[in-house]
Image (cartoon, helix red, strand yellow):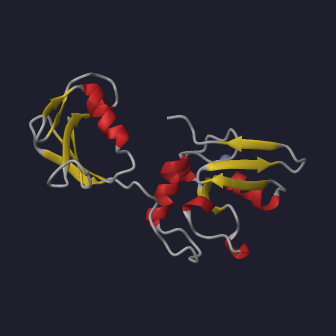
């Protein structure tokens, strides 16, 4: 299966589009088949991976092809959290999806509840002026959501996706994103 990446903004490409063809297996480091950079030719697997890594903040148009070349899927990657009016009471569907994908599990220390089964919590309550923005939202399971709101635990989101919990006795626990 081929993953074809077409980048919209690349300074060195005259047409402004960089097209990289690479297999998913190569991108994942499972094999070392060369990629293909349009207007340039084959590039070693390492180079293909570097290109993707260097441009991981860019927005990519992607195409997933079957081995016979037919198109299975196409779309656009999202390099930034979806924009939403921070005064809204609830995260919209796109921002909810972003938070669930970012957090992957409940953000309480050691909790493995998948984020798809979690609630989206405002780290600083909406009622206290907390914005509906990715840096103030987190996936919390029902139990830990309740513990935060009523159990005396305090939660601070240091940077988006990085948290410090303070227990009722004042002990702190840092929660960083789960390893890949
Ligand atoms: Zn939890």
In the image, 68 versus 156, the foreground residue is 156
Question: Which residue is at a point 60% across and 44% down the rendered structure image?
Answer: 113
- Picture quadrant of residue 90: bottom right
Furthest-right residue in view?
169
Give coordinates of residue 161: x percent, y percent: 59, 50
Question: Which residue is at a point 59% across and 54% down the rendered structure image?
Answer: 160
Does residue 18 appear in this view? Answer: yes
Q: Quadrant of the N terminus?
A: top left
Give coordinates of residue 60: x percent, y percent: 29, 51
79 versus 65 height, above or below? below
Question: Which residue is at a point 56% across and 73% down the rendered structure image?
Answer: 86
In the image, 124 versus 19, the foreground residue is 19
89 left or right, relative to 3: right
Give coordinates of residue 96: x percent, y percent: 50, 61
- Picture quadrant of residue 173: top right
124 left or right, relative to 27: right
70 left or right, relative to 93: left
179 versus 75 height, above or below? above
52 left or right, relative to 94: left
In the image, 112 versus 10, the foreground residue is 10
Question: Which residue is at a point 9% across and 36% down the rendered structure image?
Answer: 68
Furthest-top residue in view?
31
Give coordinates of residue 130: x percent, y percent: 67, 70
Number of labelled discs?
0
């Amino acid at each position: 299966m081929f993953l074809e990446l077409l980048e919209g903004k690349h300074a060195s490409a005259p047409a402004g589009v960089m097209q990289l063809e690479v297999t998913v297996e190569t991108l994942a480091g499972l094999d070392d088949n060369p990629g293909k950079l349009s207007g340039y030719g084959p590039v070693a697997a390492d180079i293909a991976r570097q290109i993707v890594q260097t441009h991981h903040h860019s927005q990519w148009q992607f195409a997933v092809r079957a081995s016979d070349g037919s198109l299975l899927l196409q779309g656009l990657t999202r390099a930034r959290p979806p924009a939403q009016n921070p005064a809204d009471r609830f995260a919209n569907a796109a921002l909810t999806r972003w938070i669930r994908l970012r957090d992957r599990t409940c953000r309480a220390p050691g909790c493995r509840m998948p984020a798809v089964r979690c609630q989206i919590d405002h780290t600083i309550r909406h009622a206290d002026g907390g914005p509906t923005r990715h840096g103030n939202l987190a996936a919390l399971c029902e139990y830990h959501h309740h513990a935060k709101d009523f159990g005396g635990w305090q939660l601070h989101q240091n940077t988006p996706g990085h948290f410090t919990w303070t227990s009722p006795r004042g002990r702190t626990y840092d929660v960083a994103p789960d390893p890949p």
